[in-house]
Image: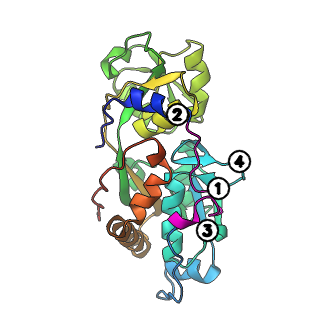
Amino acid sequence: MMRFTKFAATVAAVGALALVGCSGSGTAAPTDEAPVKEDVSFEAGTTMAKLHDAGKITVGTKFDQPLFGLMGLDGNPEGFDVEIAKLIAAELGIAPENIEWVEAVSANREPFIEKGEVDIVVATYTINDKRKEVVSFAGPYYVAGQDLLVLSGNPEKIKGIDDVKGKKVCSVTGSTSAQNLKDAGVEVIETDTYSNCLTPLRQGEVVAASTDNVILAGLADQNPGEFEVVDNPFTEEPYGIGLKKDDTEFRNFINDTLEKSFKDGSWAKAWESTAGKVLATPTPPTVDRY
């Protein structure tokens, strides 16, 4: 798990930095984009063949999470998750402009996949056994850790999860973060998106907001001087790419694509053009071919 030493200081130092990651249309930083494969073919009947022949892919991602999935001013999402989706599309021979982006909040990711409303979900989506009962996962492509976001200066002197037990903490309905808090004896105030936790935190209705440290870092960066991350993660959250249950061929294809990106530098470029504006480049994780 990546640990962010001197996290709050780092976020404060870059607080004024605009989030200028690649846009969904691929126009923000074309030099960092993976080349779209040409003259590729796939076995008939596979999901890869279907998507390639259609020339488009529908991707569920977050629209409100700085650094990973945030709707840009041009109407296209940007962030590390978005760039990971583009890498997969490129291997299918699909250009960024032919990706249809659908907002996927924590509570609707499995239904979107099950109902075929999206082809994949790349949305800070933690791999766990309960979710594996209804969807399959490729990856992980990143491992985060759940942490706490508090007001700048940390007036409650919160050092970790033990300090918020029995207190009110904001998280998102349907997320592993909310469940982890409940399991730890925390009173959880739930909302639909993590950005909606900021107002109750400002107003003192909760003592903290909680989710993965990278998401909290993005929120702190987007609101300079208001918040800081405690920097004491208490879980490991392997981010995976959700897809239809038991579509083994497609899952293997995505895993192959991820491993290729780890080796050829395209994964690191995707990070550095998005989350890397704030956070150090981590070591790629090991793909779990379960």
Q: Nearer the viewer, residue 194 or 69?
A: 69
Q: CA distance from mark 2 to mark 1?
A: 24 Å
Q: Main secondary structure of the magenta part?
A: loop
* Left or right position of 120 against 97: left
Q: Nearer the viewer, residue 161 or 259?
A: 259
Q: Residues within 10 Å of mark 2 (few under 14, many from 20)?
A: many
Query: Magenta stretch?
Result: 17-32
Q: Tag 4's secondary structure? A: loop
Instruction: Tell me the mark number nearer the camera, choosing from 1 and 3.
Output: 3
Q: Specify the label residue 221 is tagged with.
A: 2
Disc on the earlier residue, 4 or 1: 4
Q: Amino acid at mark 1?
A: Val
Disc 4 target residue: 73
Q: CA distance from mark 3 to mark 2?
A: 27 Å
Q: Specify the label residue 96 is tagged with.
A: 3
Q: Tag 1's secondary structure? A: strand
Q: Quadrant of residue 160?
A: top left
Disc on the earlier residue, 1 or 3: 3
Q: CA distance from mark 3 to mark 4?
A: 17 Å
Disc 1 target residue: 102
Instruction: Tell me the mark number nearer the camera, choosing from 3 and 2.
Output: 2
Q: Is residue 255 above or below residue 170?
A: below
Q: CA distance from mark 4 to mark 2?
A: 17 Å
Q: Tag 2's secondary structure? A: helix
Q: Tag 3's secondary structure? A: helix
Q: Is residue 31 magenta?
A: yes
Q: CA distance from mark 4 to mark 1?
A: 16 Å
* Left or right position of 33 against 137: right
